[in-house]
Image (cartoon, grey):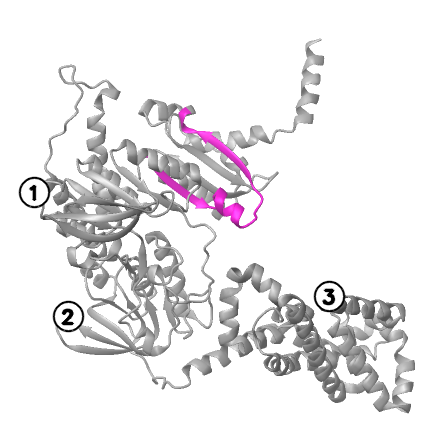
Amino acid sequence: MKKLFIIAAVLSIAAIFYLLGFDQYLSLQGLKDSQQQINQFNQQQPILVALTFLGLYVLVTALSIPGAVILTLGAGAFFGVLWGTIIVSFASSIGATIAFLVARYLFKESAQQRFGDKLEAINQGIEKEGAFYLFSLRLVPLFPFFMINLIMGLTPIRTFTFYWVSQLGMLAGTIVFVNAGTQLAQLDGLGGILSPALLLSFVLLGVFPIIAKKMTEQIQARKVYAKWQKPKKFDRNIVVIGGGAAGLVSSYIGAAVKAKVSLVEAHKMGGDCLNYGCVPSKAIIKSAKVAEQLRNASHYGLNIDQQPLQNIPFSFKAVMQRVHDTIAQIEPHDSIERYSKLGVDVIQGYAKIIDPWTVEIKLNTGEVQRLTTRSIIIAAGGKPRIPDIEGLEEIGYLTSDTMWEALAQYEKIPQKMIFLGGGPIGCELAQSFSRLGANVTQVEKHSRLMRQEDLEVSQIARESLTASGVEVLTEHSAKRCEIRDGTKYLVVEHHGAEIALAYDVLICAVGREARLTGYGLEELGVDTAGTVVTNQYLQTIFPNIYAAGDVAGPFQFTHSASHQAWYAAVNALFSPFKKFKADYRVIPRSTFLDPEIARVGLNEQEAKSQNINYHVTKFDMSELDRAIVDGATKGFVKVLTVPGKDKILGVTIVGEQASELLAEYVLAMKYNLGLNKILGTIHTYPTMSEANKYAAGEWKRAHAPQQVLKWLEKFHDYRRS
């Protein structure tokens, strides 16, 4: 009831304000019409007029009534620059604080309860740097004055902080507007607008946001660098920590533009993708797929003595050797020798950031080297996440980082394998090892596999794994590992009951996490929250220290790491003269199951969670000639578009070569090409890529102008008569 009373009181005061005609002073023409009368009152009763004006200004800002800009100009016209600035400075801050308090009392509690999860990050930022955020907003006149008051009322910023920061932050803008008002008061006609003083006022208004932005950046930089001594000169332009995808691309770009770059890598060049992830996993996926095709050769009419090839003899050791041979064949692309020839100073050792411009490197030879550098790029990558399971460490496990070396020692494939995790890595590996002859069990604690994808995609993934011989156990939580009579068991819980699963090899594939320790981030005070916290330019709280790749997130793809690396390197080399915001609008992803699952942009569950309206167009692979020829009819192309338009919001493709087919949609989304453009593009027949054109055709058919078609039907009937 109290809140309802306050809302009613605010509305009543606003209504009285308009009924008494005070709103006439909130337009430029009304201000000029009353200028002479107000000036006369001001000469007779200057204190009374000033107090009345101050009260009116407080009322307008407190009620969030549009017109504060006009009143500020009026302050310059009636009181001059000095007194006009003083009056407006205090009136605007008082009124803003009242609006802030009213918004806080009326709406903060309900807003936090309803949107607490979405506001959590904002609340943390406000508690830590609230004064600086508010100061930045107040400096830039482009942000609506009243909106800042209301929104800040929903945050945990202190009232006193809000008041003094508002007064300080609005001061410069107030001076500019008041100064403009002194000139507006003297205008007799449109010609007067060209007066030098007035032009100067509006020039200041135009450049002020730029100046304000630079000022805030300088203030923030001075704050974070305060306790550090900057070197007078630097050994390097960039020191890159980590030799994975992000580190290699960053150092390559630096060397290409003739900067002096050092790349520090403690272990293997090429990072996780070359040595433990993309390359070895895709190599074994290929071997497993060939085995599956041979096993099902009868489907293609290939029989030996009229008997299908049921059992494929092969050497598991040879398969694993091929995996390592593939790594060795690609390795020169990421080698020390290659990057040294490109002009990169490659250093083998462990890097630690000592201060914002100094990196200490413990060389693999045992020596220690220190380098000063203008910029640092942290590209330390990620590592497998290890679940907290009783007995896991004691009994032993493998991850995507350790399995390739360990399994290469096996003469035969392990007979009983358990894969923990139902994400892309777990699904890919479970299917491959099952196809190669292992008895594979996949354990996932949630209700379905591939939870980031739509439900129908998850169902296809499960069906595919089951068809490949994988026993998929969803809603099974791993509890402990134990040994009974010499046999290893993973004990899982399912709907309250415990089940013991015997295994020879247990592989943890429950996701990856950023490598954050050992690089000096804690000592330096660089923010981390699961990843290194960066801004839109990939800068940390230290503007000359950047992060890219898995260590920065939010994606954990090799191609997104390379994408980020370009921004980090260019910004590190050319800031503050030029900076580029990292663009995450179009990030493709693929899971190399059979059939493949590929996506870019939104899927249906994401669109629904974000309350985004969409239209779905779907084309089934069973209708595609090439898919029928290849015996690869499982899957579909699903496109989400803006309702009534051909603008693409997201695409999900399930099927043979899905990751390759996706590229056309990635290009289309990157350059804002709609489905009409894809439909109008010639696609070779017969190819899988025709699925993209047919999906666009389905959209066109669904959006055909029915009334026009009726008229055309009558027209053709007429021509036949």
Q: Which one is earlier in the sequence, the residue at label 3 or at label 2?
A: 3
Q: Nearer the viewer, residue 451 or 360?
A: 451
Q: Is residue 592 visible in the rendered structure shown here?
A: no
Q: Amino acid at mark 2?
A: Asn
Q: Position of residue 221 (x, y in %)?
A: 46, 79
Q: Which residue is mark 2?
A: 364
Name above or below for residue 345 compared with residue 44.
above
Image quadrant assignment for residue 467: top left
Q: Which residue is mark 1?
A: 411
Q: Which one is earlier in the sequence, the residue at label 3 or at label 1?
A: 3
Q: Position of residue 3 (x, y in %)?
A: 71, 67
Residue extending farthest to the front is 497
Element assignment for label 2: loop
Residue 603 part of the magenta segment:
yes
Q: Position of residue 519 (x, y in %)?
A: 28, 72
Residue extending farthest to the top is 721
Q: Which residue is mark 3?
A: 1
Q: CA distance from mark 3 to mark 1?
A: 78 Å
**Is residue 683 found left or right of 301 in the rendered image?**
right
Q: CA distance from mark 3 to mark 2?
A: 71 Å
Residue extending farthest to the left is 411
Image quadrant assignment for residue 9: bottom right
Question: Residue 595, labelled with which disc?
Answer: none
**Is residue 434 found left or right of 659 in the rendered image?**
left
**Is residue 500 found left or right of 424 in the rendered image?**
left
Element assignment for label 1: loop
Image quadrant holding the N terminus, namely bottom right
Write the start and end of the magenta stretch as one range: 595-622
Q: Amino acid at mark 3?
A: Met
Q: Position of residue 690 (x, y in %)?
A: 42, 30
